[in-house]
Image (spheres, rainbow, N blue to C red):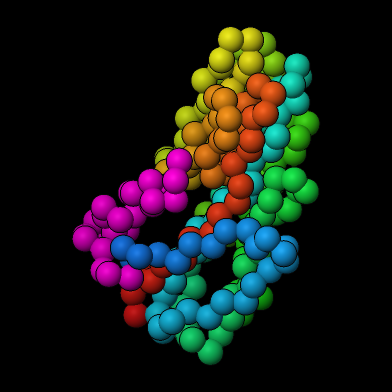
Amino acid sequence: MAAGQLLHGLVGQGLNGRKPNALMQTPYVFTHLTAGGARAWSVPRVGYWKFVAWGPGAPANNGINGGASGAYVEVMRFLTPSQNVTIQVGLSVPKIDTVLTFPDGTIATAGAASANGPGGLAAGGDINLGGTAGVIAGGINGNPGLGTGGGPGGAAVGANSGGAGAPANLPFIGGQGGSSGAAAIGAGAPESNGGIPGQGLVVAFFVKK
């Protein structure tokens, strides 16, 4: 699932049921830095900003289990352009959590999933949803993601089990677990050889003054 599809629910409707403003239609999207580490980001205008973060999904263990999904957090804070939010977007391999650090000291973590089956752990957000565990090998559909917008598990392909879907709360939609090839954002990899887990992501958008 591409980033534009991930944000479809947000683009179509604001959190209060009204049509969103221009900034909400063009949210700021952060992916993993190739060089690793975190980035400091300052909001472009004063007001309440919502941050939505996914931890990366896990690789599968061929013959053992499909990949688990990463965790999910939402945080809303009043911010000014003089303040920085530190954003670390997670990665599946090596295992790196998605972490947001706010000026008031809040640290919100959307944890990366583990390769041996457990989903990522969520902490510090206004909303915290853990990742879903990977299913055992043997041609089983992956577990769906938690939350009102949790993504579906990946469909089994033959004897290979699917990956776990990513968690989310509406209007956001979690990525679908992998069936073959690459999984969507935050979702687990399929059991098949060459299956790729979904990576972490952070989205930030202006809500109101």
Left/right placement of residue 18 relative to residue 170 reads left
In the image, is residue 208 above or below residue 81?
Answer: above
Q: Name the residue rendered at 45%, 41% in the picture.
A: 1
Q: Name the residue rendered at 57%, 25% in the picture.
A: 180
Residue 117, position in %: x, y? 73, 30
Left/right placement of residue 155 relative to residue 206 reads right
In the image, is residue 179 above or below residue 159?
Answer: below
Q: Can residue 128 be seen from the camera position used here?
A: no
Residue 19, position in %: x, y? 21, 60
9 in magenta: yes
Residue 78, position in %: x, y? 46, 78
Q: Name the residue rendered at 70%, 34% in the picture.
A: 59
In the image, is residue 59 above or below residue 91?
Answer: above
- Over which residues does the magenta segment extend? 1-23
Quadrant in the picture for residue 14: bottom left
Q: Name the residue rendered at 44%, 46% in the picture.
A: 2
Quadrant in the picture for residue 25: bottom left
Front residue of 72 and 194? 194
Quadrant in which the C terminus is drawn: bottom left
6 in magenta: yes
